[in-house]
Image (cartoon, coloured by chain):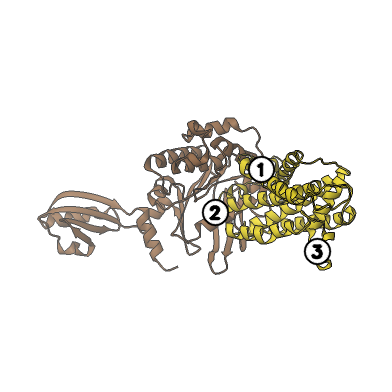
Amino acid sequence: MTAAIRAHALEKRYRDVHALRGIDLTVEQGEFFALLGPNGAGKTTFISILAGLARATAGRAEVMGHDVVNDYRAARRMLGVVPQELVFDPFFTVRETLRIQSGYYGLRRNDAWIDELLTHLGLADKADTNMRRLSGGMKRRVLVAQALVHRPPVIVLDEPTAGVDVELRQSLWAFIRRLNREGHTILLTTHYLEEAEALCERVAMLKQGRIVALDHTARLLSRDAERRLELKLAPPRLPPELQGRLVECRDGRYCLRLSDYAEVETVLASLREAGIRVEDMALAQADLEDVFLRIMGQQV
Amino acid sequence: MTGFLTLFHKELLRFWKVMLQTVAAPILTALLYLLIFSHVLEEHVQVYPGVSYTAFLMPGLIMMSVLQNAFANSSSSLIQSKITGNIVFVLLPPLSYVEFFLAYLLAAMVRGLVVGLGVALVGLAFTDLTLAHPLWMLAFALAASAVFGAIGIIAGIWAEKFDHLAGIQNFLIVPLTFLSGVFYSIHSLPPFWQAVSHWNPVFYMIDGFRYGFFGQSDVPPGVGMAVVLPSVLVLTGLTLLLLRRGYKLRH
């Protein structure tokens, strides 16, 4: 099957910045994929090249098998982009904005789909409101609708929930999840790592223009991610053989490092032998933020 | 084709929705020029035999309005879109650079011609106008609006802030149009300034346009068109080249 997005040895140099340093990446059709990285890592540059807003210095990129330069018309029809900036055209109403955007993609009579988008995005009662009069959250929804007017199989969301309230964030994700279930490929960049963890099957982490991690989210979380055991002990002391596992002790709670959940048994046995009672116990696994911080902390 | 037509339509809507500023205001400005200059000079100046000064002035003012508004339309639309960031809505879809160019150019020409027509209609209240050669008149109006529409696109792409655009408008467009025979015949100028005027392409646009009304001009209309038409072609080529390379639009 043709990949939804394929990048091969993608390079981008600006005058004094080497923004992308050879990106190889394939996102399969139907995936919910996250592109993570700190500011300046190259996420937006990568998306801009896919969308034709920037031109690669070397390498190539394809959307649904269409080269973004040589076959740009087909590639752009396959792609819907929700830009990071909250941009709008102040001359038009919401419906006019969506009709115009449809027309750019060659769609003349698109009102049935526009109405559906307006309904799903909670914009139905704002259809005839000028863009200037919308709140920031509403403008963000229109941006999503604009990206979807031509029913693209691949949808790119560049920081779509930045500055968006919790309610809108939830409804936006419910809608995007539905699109994904219906077969759309989603490429997401976000600073909210818990969103990527909850939504995305695979994750690529970018640092200084390079991919430094690329894996299934679950595998990335389990791979060298340490588990932790939190204990409240009576009396509050730790046997000497467990001292090596201690990460921290705060408010009478001991946080111990485990390399495997099976080690819980060993820890409990040591505590029993020492005559220490467990009053409370919790297991914690590293989240994507821990993995992200660890990987970003490493040298490229 | 739908993509191009949509962009063209969007550009027309853009100026039409604020027509008080984009159409009515320039018509009023031209009318003020007409009232003041005709009041002061009507009794004292007759440029062509049998043509009153007010009638002589009219085609110049119409053409000046056409040129300035064609430039203003494409340049202001592009700079606004760039600064607000909504240019991205035009750059993301599968529009070719030729469609992009034609849509912005034709919309600029329409705005220029609509304002020009408005000036002509209002001016008819003050003087009679005859059309000796309507095809020449039309040809010069179309070609000249295309030249300034294309300059507007180039300026809009190049400018990074409104200040840049204001610089081009005030230091290039206004002097070029004012010093091109809108208000006078270049034959009334000293020889040096006559010679300088011949290097100003706007002079040929206004002179040829005026020929369409009176059948009289400073240079034959064929000569004027031989200057204006290549200007259209050169500017079209240059604009297409910039758009194809994505100059200041696609990084």
Q: Which mark is residue B23?
A: 1
Chain brown in the figure, letter: A
Choose top left, top right, bottom left or bottom right for residue A223: bottom left
Q: Are marks 2 and 3 on the same chain?
A: no
Across and down, in percent, residue A213 comes to: 45, 59
Which element carries disc 3, helix, strand or loop? loop
* Separation of marks 1 and 3 at Cα, in angstroms: 30 Å
Looking at the picture, tell me which residue is in the foreground, B79 or A205: B79
Callout 3: chain: B
Q: Secondary structure at mark 2?
A: helix
Is residue A79 visible in the rendered structure shown here?
A: yes
- Mark 1 vs 3: CB contact within 8 A: no
User: Which chain wears yellow?
Assistant: B
Percent of width and height locating residue A108: 66, 35
Q: Chain of mark 2?
A: A
Q: Residue at x 42, y 38 (%)?
A: A171
Residue annotated with mark 2:
A47
Label 3 is placed on what type of residue?
A: Trp
* Above or below: residue A256 compared with residue B110: below
- Going by the numbered disc 1, the residue's amino acid type is Val
Name the mark nearer the viewer: 2 or 1: 1
Question: Callout 2: 10 Å neighbours few (<14), some, many (20+)?
Answer: many
Name the residue that disc number 3 marks: B199
Q: Nearer the viewer, residue A65 or B143?
A: B143
